[in-house]
């Protein structure tokens, strides 16, 4: 059974940085595209970033230029580096393996809360 465990969230001031981690167990992440998603209170979950099998990243427009995604296939971890954070980045962040159509494949983990506030 594949499990995804996110970590690294917290409270940060606007303009600050955080690095999120997502550890995959039960399957090699090297075989899958990976994605980061977020869900703000009262809103639907949205995609934030994707990493291809070769590590090429695709970023959603609201985070382009501020966030970066990377992957460590040896340790089955993907990262989301978040810089110049804004209050509107406040959300629970999730990761998932994604299919060829970029749809999430696994059950969602517990996520990690990111709060951007002064």
Image (spheres, rainbow, N blue to C red):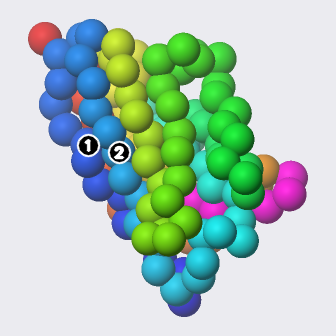
Relative to 59, is 16 above or below?
A: above
Q: Tag 2's secondary structure?
A: strand
Q: Residues within 10 Å of mark 2 (few under 14, many from 20)?
A: many
The picture places residue 62, in percent across and down from the top left corner, at: 57, 16
Q: Earlier in the sequence, mark 1 or mark 2?
A: 1
Residue holding disc 1: 9
Residue interval drawn in magenta: 96-101
Are there few (<14), some (14-19), or many (20+) residues within 10 Å of tag 1?
Answer: some
Q: Is residue 7 left or right of residue 103?
A: left
Mark 2 and mark 1 in contact (Cβ < 8 Å)?
Answer: yes
Q: Nearer the viewer, residue 46 or 10?
A: 10
Q: Residue at x 37, y 53 (%)?
A: 21
Tell me which residue sits at (32%, 39%) in the image. 19
Where's the N terminus, which quadrant? Answer: bottom right
Residue 26 locus on image (x, y percent): 52, 86
Indicate yes or no whether the magenta region holds residue 88.
no
> Which disc is residue 20 wearing?
2
């Amino acid at each position: 059974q594949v499990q995804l465990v996110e970590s690294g969230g917290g409270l940060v001031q606007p303009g600050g940085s955080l690095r999120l981690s997502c550890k995959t167990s039960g399957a090699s992440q090297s075989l899958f595209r990976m994605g980061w998603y977020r869900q703000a209170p009262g809103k639907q979950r949205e995609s934030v970033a994707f990493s291809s099998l070769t590590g090429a990243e695709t970023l959603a427009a609201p985070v382009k230029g501020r966030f970066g995604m990377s992957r460590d296939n040896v340790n089955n971890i993907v990262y989301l580096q978040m810089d110049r954070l804004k209050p509107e980045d406040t959300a629970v962040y999730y990761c998932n393996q994604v299919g060829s159509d970029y749809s999430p494949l696994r059950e969602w983990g517990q996520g990690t809360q990111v709060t951007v506030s002064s």
